[in-house]
Image: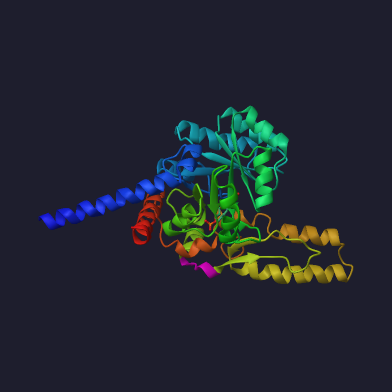
Amino acid sequence: MNNVQNKMIFIENSRKEYALSWIEERWKKGKDFLGTSTGILCGAMTWVSHHELVQGVCCAGGFGILAGGSMTPDQLSEQLRYLDNARCRPFGVNLIVFHPKFQELVDVCGQHKVTHIFLGGGLPSSSVFKSLASYNILPVAFAPSVALAQRLIRSGAQALVIEGHEAGGHVGPVSTQVLAQEILPVLGKEVPIFVAGGIGNGRGIMSYLFMGASGCQLGSRFVCTHESKAHDAFKEAFIRAHARDAVLSYGIDARLPVIPVRALSNKATEKFVDFQKDVLKEIEEGIVTLDEGKMKVEHFWSGALYRAVVKGDVEYGSVMAGQSVGMVKARESCKEVIQTLTNEMIEAFNETCI
Ligand SMILES: Cc1cc2nc3c(=O)[nH]c(=O)nc-3n(C[C@H](O)[C@H](O)[C@H](O)COP(=O)(O)O)c2cc1C
């Protein structure tokens, strides 16, 4: 190797170190809060985020979150035992505040010395925060606006996730970009804020670090990892899909409320619209009451995520996916995903900041 080549390698390494030190500085607050070596979180995904994926993400330097929202206390305890035995730490657990056994689930987390709980499914009451504090568990809440974010911090949230319309699963109406612009400048210095929804590349993560995020939460990008429990057919559907295939299932009439869900377009998403039309007709003709109609619509998707993720029914199940699905190109390990994201972050920094 001659002197010129040596110099080029030296310059390349210096640029990389400079980029890494900038990134370290930007997500330090997030890393310190999570106890990880990166500010990359893998969001909880029901049926997908079991102990294997959580462990895979944690071992790769990210922060894994167990999807405890639809688990019974016994199922949660079993998952946590695996993580205890693997000495996998730190990691988080996602719980839904309206779960009928919410307090029992918190107690299980307390017994297993879980450090972080991500509170989904609505606004947590102050008693929820008190209960978590009694176990020294750090509460993280989902904030859909500046006003609610401020209220959540006042109530006891120690960190926030802001998740936009592009995300996979249940979504709010506002895009990730807009939430980030509204919330990060106001509250980004108060508590760690993690941005989620539509992020599939390190360049996306960098853009939010520039804006004041303490890290980013990705879901879809981790679905096809070797460690993910998703059925082969579910993973194949992800690899085939483009961003535009991740569509919203929405209500067609205000009388039948529907929480919008982003999933890959399939027979079920098509059928859902006609199904609602049929139910409305039945209501108008007096065949069913409005309440019965609401129940019918609510039940349409029941068990649909399980059918898709666990049984591989990607036509009639719910293939929840974010618009970031278009950036999922192959099956990889969690380590490869996090390494790729980090390399993309460094490239983005070197292209724009040096
Ligand atoms: C298959 C699937 C299941 C999900 N399940 C949950 C869940 O149980 N609880 C939750 O808070 N978020 C859930 N999410 C949202 C993710 O945690 C994450 O925030 C979201 O996927 C981010 O958007 P992205 O997919 O574009 O990265 C789910 C997402 C997917 C794709």
Q: How far across and how far down the image is residue 226, in percent?
A: 42, 51
- Residue 1 or 53: which is nearer the viewer? 1
Quick check: can you spot residue 121?
A: no
Q: Residue at x 19, y 56 (%)?
A: 8
In the shown orientation, is residue 17 left or right of residue 141? left
In reply to whether residue 27 is colored magenta, the answer given is no
In the shown orientation, is residue 269 left or right of residue 353? right
Q: Is residue 228 above or below residue 320?
A: above
| Magenta portion: prevailing SS class | helix
Q: Is residue 300 above or below residue 37?
A: below
Segment tinted magenta in the rendering: 240-244
Q: How far across and how far down the image is residue 33, in percent?
A: 51, 38
- Residue 29 or 135: which is nearer the viewer? 29
Instruction: State which quarter of the image contains the C terminus.
Output: bottom left
- Residue 200 or 160: which is nearer the viewer? 160
| Picture quadrant of residue 36 | top left
Q: How far across and how far down the image is residue 275, in percent?
A: 73, 68
